[in-house]
Amino acid sequence: MRKYIIVGGSFALISVVLGAFASHSLKAYFSTEVLQSFETGIRYMMYHGLALMIFSQIPNARNNLIFKLFFWGVILFSFSIFILCFGNLTPYDFSWLGPVTPVGGSLLILGWVIFISKTFKEKSQ
């Protein structure tokens, strides 16, 4: 499905751009701990971008619920990390976003659980 490839490719592209930006520009501004958090957001965005592109080729994986869970999981997980990290460079307090990150992670986990469950059920039928 086209939306899987577009969204997955977009997540992969953003991951590469942010990864390059982090390794070349942000080291001077972020502590090691903040940079590691930022890289975690990048890594999970890339993993799920690639997963969406792969899922576009697997009929069993083309499921609107899984797509939505991955999409919103990446948005909430990765982007909340990015905003929290950049918030360290601004006078604004973004700490209220802290609880959003695990919600995004939970959506990603749920997406994988549904994918595995759906695959298991179809295999045994």
Image (cartoon, rainbow, N blue to C red):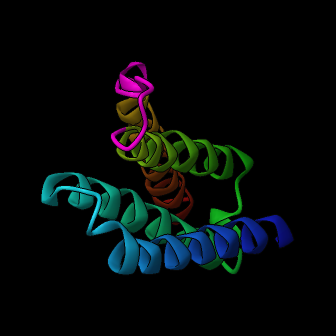
81 sits left or right of 32 in the view: right
Q: Quadrant of the N terminus?
A: bottom right
Q: Which range is magenta?
A: 88-99
**Residue 110 locus on image (x, y percent):** 45, 41
Residue 55 seen anywhere in this rendered image of the structure: no
Quarter of the rendering containing residue 93: top left
Does residue 43 belong to the magenta stretch? no
Measuring 57% from the left and 75% from the top, which residue is drawn there? 12
Measuring 32% from the left and 64% from the top, which residue is drawn there? 39
Q: Is residue 45 above or below residue 6?
A: above
**Residue 88 locus on image (x, y percent):** 33, 40
Is the magenta region chiefly helix, strand or loop? loop
Quarter of the rendering containing residue 19: bottom left
21 vs 121, nearest the viewer: 21
Q: Quadrant of the C terminus?
A: bottom right
Measuring 51% from the left and 55% from the top, which residue is drawn there? 115
43 vs 82, nearest the viewer: 82
**Residue 67 locus on image (x, y percent):** 67, 52
Measuring 15% from the left and 53% from the top, which residue is drawn there? 33
Residue 59 seen anywhere in this rendered image of the structure: yes
Quarter of the rendering containing residue 69: top right
Specify the farthest residue to the left. 32
Q: Is residue 18 above or below residue 106?
A: below
